[in-house]
Image: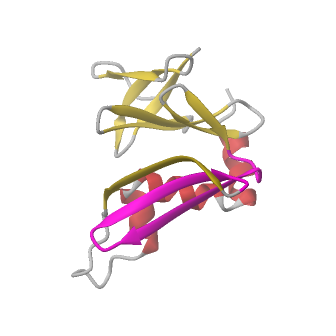
Amino acid sequence: MTRVLHLWKRIWQSVAFDTARGQGRVRWLSRAPSRGIGWAMKHAGTWYALWSDGQQVIFQVGTKQFPMTDAYQCRNVRFDATRKFTISEKECVSFEVTYDAFDRDDDPSFDLADLEQEDFFFFTSRLWSDSKWRQEVVKNWAA
């Protein structure tokens, strides 16, 4: 199934994201969706997406789909100039990616709210850890 998602940090563009293949295609000339329906981002050649199936929010990397439920734990931890995003199930790592940190240590006004808007993986981990927010997102992203 193809879903039209916002392109992360480029809300005026959209991505035709094929959930079966885990592939996205940036829609340069098409109008962006008029409301929030999910996000997609390409990092190091791999597509990542957040979307709702109407019951729960799904985090997808390639063809792997992880429902945002309490069965999985999601962490995003900073290590010096990098961050590690991890999804675990019963303490076994199911997925992880390490990437350059977006934190701006030299900017005293840069806080967690700013980081949430800059960093797709940090945003995902915060959403995953807040069940009330997730339920609101499911309602707002319903097809």
- Relative to 8, say whether 124 is above or below: below
Picture quarter containing residue 24?
top left
Dominant SS of magenta comes to strand
Relative image position of residue 59 (x, y in whole percent): 58, 40
In the rendered view, does 128 fall on the left or right side of 45?
Answer: right
The residue positioned 21% from the left and 82% from the top of the image is 106
Picture quarter containing residue 19?
top right
Which stretch appears magenta? 68-90
Query: Which quarter shows the C terminus?
Result: top right
User: Could you say which is closer to the camera, residue 58 or residue 99?
Assistant: 99
In the rendered view, does 92 fall on the left or right side of 117?
Answer: right
Type of colouring? secondary structure
Residue extending farthest to the front is: 92
User: Could you say which is closer to the camera, residue 128 or residue 143?
Assistant: 128
Relative image position of residue 103 (x, y in whole percent): 31, 70
Query: Which quarter shows the N terminus?
Result: top right
Residue 75 inside the magenta-drawn segment: yes
Residue extending farthest to the bottom is: 108
User: Could you say which is closer to the camera, residue 137 or residue 24?
Assistant: 24
In the rendered view, does 73 fall on the left or right side of 10?
Answer: right
